[in-house]
Amino acid sequence: MPPSAAEYQNRTLDTMCVNESTLTHKWYHNLKYLAVGIIFGITFVKAEIISWYRIQEMFRFQSFHMYGVIGTAVLTGIVSVWLIKRTGVKTIYGERIEFHDKKFNKGQIIGGLLFGFGWAITGACPGPLFAQIGAGTLVVAATLLSAIAGTWVYGYFRDRLPH
Amino acid sequence: MLHITQPWPWYVAGVVAGLTVPALLLLGNKHFGISANLRHVCAACIPGRVRFFDYNWKKEMWNLFFAAGIIVGGYLASQYLSTSDPVVLHPDLKKELALYGITEHAGLLPKQLFSLETLFSLKGFLLFIVGGFLVGFGARYAGGCTSGHAIMGLSTLQWPSLVATISFMIGGLIMANIVLPLILSL
């Protein structure tokens, strides 16, 4: 069922996909996303992306590594998206792949800066936090819980913040 | 060159990470964005009466499975695919960290910082709690983190994502070079 207007508005504020499958799947269809996540998590650890040191080196311009990772990822993504658009390929269920333009708002700047502060302090953005916990650095659970708290506080004060 | 227990070079990791974008699109029209999971957890567990968390989070279950996969992948890689060689640091970073008493570099994160004892200190409070809070608050305020904006957003040529990515970097540069030394000196 397509989302109601209010829910649509709520969801487009984010990176959340508003494109929905009109098919309803059983829960185990989500296992393929688990599989992609596993590959991603392995890559995070193997390429030291989860390393606090690598992030510090990145922000001190002492190493090209993280710029290389992000840059290559972006290039790969750009080429992939272009190919998808060009060939009109569909999802494995035969549905159209859709893209929506993001709207600019001041949050990208203010929130972006704040996120950058947190990224440098913790040496991690959300993805690596999950991988670090998996890799056994359990104190990072405190960071993750704080990140959830931060998310909640944002949601609570959202209407009072400049956008 | 690409031995399974040695660290992977950036051009391999970058390609694999980048391929997550088409993989998620092809598997089900899903847009890559990890920080959204923090929002889904709020919506699922502590929505309160906050409109921002008033949506059908169950439709985003795929992303929670993805995040769970990251945890599993982290476990598998650290248990079975890693060496116990100490991580190689830039000598200047090593010198700087020595100033703060951080000298043990056996793992990917300095265990002198990432320990339970540090957590319960002022330094730890700033590093974990304040740092984590900023990651969560900032990502949501910006509408995404590095995966959603820097990778997915730039892959789809969204200029607001470029603004966000640049802001991430400026924020990080300021914090790492100016403020973090103060925190680590505590």
Image (cartoon, rainbow, N blue to C red):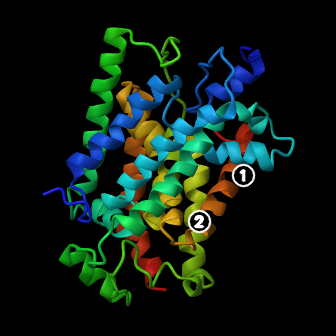
- Looking at numbered disc 1 in the image, what kind of residue is underneath it? Val
In this rendering, which labeled residue sits more in front, label 1 or label 2? Answer: 2
Q: Chain of mark 1?
A: A
| Position of residue A84 in the picture relative to residue A160 (left or right) | left
Q: Are marks 1 and 2 on the same chain?
A: yes
Considering depth in this image, is A94 or B30 the residue closer to the camera? A94
Identity of the residue drawn at 33% across and 88% down: B103
Residue sitting at x 40%, y 32%: B21
Q: Is residue A110 visible?
A: no
Quadrant location of residue B166? top left
At mark 2, the secondary structure is helix
Instruction: Give percent across and percent down for residue A21.
Output: 62, 18
Residue at far right of view: B49
**For the image shown, how many numbered marks are present on the structure?**
2
Q: Is residue B76 above or below residue B115?
A: above
Q: Where does residue B178 sit, x and y in percent of width and height?
A: 38, 69
Which residue is found at the position 77% from the left and 16% from the top? A4
Which amino acid, by three-letter code, is at mark 2? Answer: Thr
Q: Is residue B68 above or below residue B177?
A: above
Residue A21 tag number:
none
Question: Which circle's residue, 1 or 2, is located before the other in the chain?
Answer: 2
- Residue B134, position in %: x, y? 57, 58
* Residue drawn at x 66%, y 28% as measured from the top left: A11
Which residue is label 1 attached to?
A153
Q: Label 2, on which residue?
A: A143
Real-space CA distance between mark 1 and mark 2, rounded to the nearest whole angstrom: 15 Å
